[in-house]
Structure formats: structure tokens, C-alpha cells
Image (cartoon, rainbow, N blue to C red):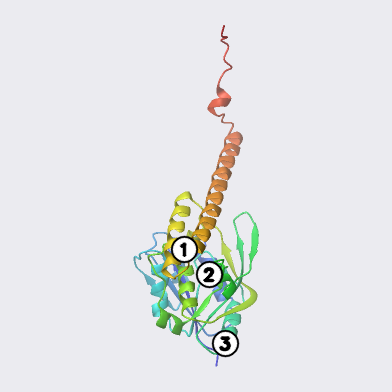
Amino acid sequence: MNPLVSIVTVTYNSADTLQETIDSVRRQTYGNIEYIVVDGESTDDTLDIIRSNADIVDRCISEPDEGIYDAMNKGIRVAGGELIGILNSDDLYLPHTVAYAAEAYQKAGEPCVVYGNMVKFDGDGNETYHEGDLTDEAFEELDLQLNHPTCFVSQTVYERHGCFDTWFKIGADRELMLRLQNAGIPRFYINKTLARFRLGGATSRSTLSDAFWLTWQNWVMYRRHGIPVGRALQRVAYVFFRRLAKSILSLEKLRRVKARLLKILGVQTIHENREPDSTTTA
């Protein structure tokens, strides 16, 4: 018998993208799905979209939360499936995603994590392909390729080892995987593209404050799980400077867009308006 698979989508003012996410769940070829939407009391049209899809949304919770991982935990706790996947409200499953996950879970025959590959995309049509990697070697190098929308975790694993630690505002999914690795929970890789991840969401920002906050959280995470100081320092430094570079590039891109817009509008900068200095010095 095909196991029940629960899918949890968390939302907050997600009217622009939520319908696409729901449609990707609707297109699944796997039949035994429970779909749960956890909303943080949206003030846009999000709730109307959820209500208009009542034929596929089995349960909707709409109440204030303490962040994205708190909302995910709410969905996990009410889920009735043997296997649970989390799909954010701006990401998409491919049509066979749940079928592949359920098949891998059944073959495993034990509580586990199954995961695969994903494509990141933006509003300009740019796409990049990302293979998942939760192997022992990836954990040893602290170089997890955690494609969160592709991860499905057994309900039993959550019951025994807990949900997301909400202290981690960014990267609680990584902390969970470290916790499960230390507990010896097996992970099974599906070498297929399972999800499309839309850039620009809460987990893909590249601001300076995010870089500093992520660095601190990574340090706490690694030390909590017994990572040696040297390796922890090496990894947090690498992640910090990578994030820092991304934030600087984002700022430079913003400056270029602003300059282009001003040029289109025919607005000159202060320097462009300044008259040449006609005075001379002796």
C-alpha cells in the first residue's frame, strides 16, 4: 500500500506565488497526499487563494507565528503522513516528486531522510542546477548541499528527534540535518530533479546583516554538535566571506539598476549637473 505523504506549505502574504505552488502539488502523479497550509495571518489575498483551492488543501492553519521554522513545526505536528515534505509558498514540485520520494522511502524500509536535486530560478529567467549532497563525506567537510524543498523526512524521525530548532532564524534545516546525522538516521539520495527553488525568499537573501547573523548561528550550530574548533572556524569564515561577497555584488547590481533607471528617466546625478570650475589658481 502506498504510504500517506504529507506536504506542508508555510505562507505569509504569498499571494503572488502561492497559486503556482499549489498547482505544482495538484499536478503530482502520486495519489495518497495530505496537503497542509500554515499561514501567518496574511493580510493580502493569500487566504482567498487557499480557500479557492479547498479541494486540494486538506487543512489550513492561519494564526500568528514566531517565524518560518515555527510555522513549519506547526505543520509537521498536525501531519498524518508517514513521510513529510516541506514546500515553501514560492517553490515548486515537479510532477513526479512525491512519487519518487515515496518510492525511495518504501525501498529504505526504515525511518529516514530522502532528498534529491533542484533548480534555482529567478524572475529574469536565470536558472542554476544544484545536486543534493547529504553524504557522510559532506558532513565531514561541513559542505552539505541541502536542497530543502527536495527533502522528505519520516514522521517517526520527527517524533524521536524533534522538529526545527526555532532559535536558528536562518539555517534551522541544516541544524536538523546535523542532529539527525549524529543520531545515525540514514539518508537516501534520489538522483533526480525534485523541486524548483525561487530566489528572493527568506532563505535566499544576501544582506550584510544576514551574513553576520548566519555566521554566528553556524558557529553555535557546529559547536553544539561537537565540530572541532578549527574546522568550525574554517567553515564559518568561508560561509561568511561568500555571503559578504554576494551582498556586495547585490549592492553593486542595485547601483547599476538605479543608474540605468535614472538615465532612462533623463535624470542627471549631482556630478553630471555640476558646471566646470572656471576659477584658476595662481
Local crowd at mark 3 within 10 Å, few (<14), some, or many (≥20)?
some
Dot placed on the residue nearer the N-terminal end, 2 or 3: 3
Between 172 and 250, the one lying in front of the other is: 172
* Cβ atoms at labels 3 and 1 below 8 Å apart: no
Dot placed on the residue nearer the N-terminal end, 2 or 1: 2
Provide the residue designation for mark 3.
Answer: 108
Residue 107 located left or right of residue 159: right
Foreground mark, 2 or 1, reads 1
Cα–Cα gap, marks 3 and 1: 35 Å
Q: Amino acid at mark 3?
A: Ala
Q: Amino acid at mark 2?
A: His
Residue lying at the far top in this picture: please name it: 282
Q: Which numbered disc covers residue 229? A: 1
Q: Quadrant of residue 103?
A: bottom right
Provide the residue designation for mark 2.
Answer: 148
Q: Quadrant of residue 125?
A: bottom right
Dot placed on the residue nearer the N-terminal end, 3 or 1: 3
Cα–Cα gap, marks 2 and 3: 20 Å
Residue lying at the far bottom in this picture: please name it: 1
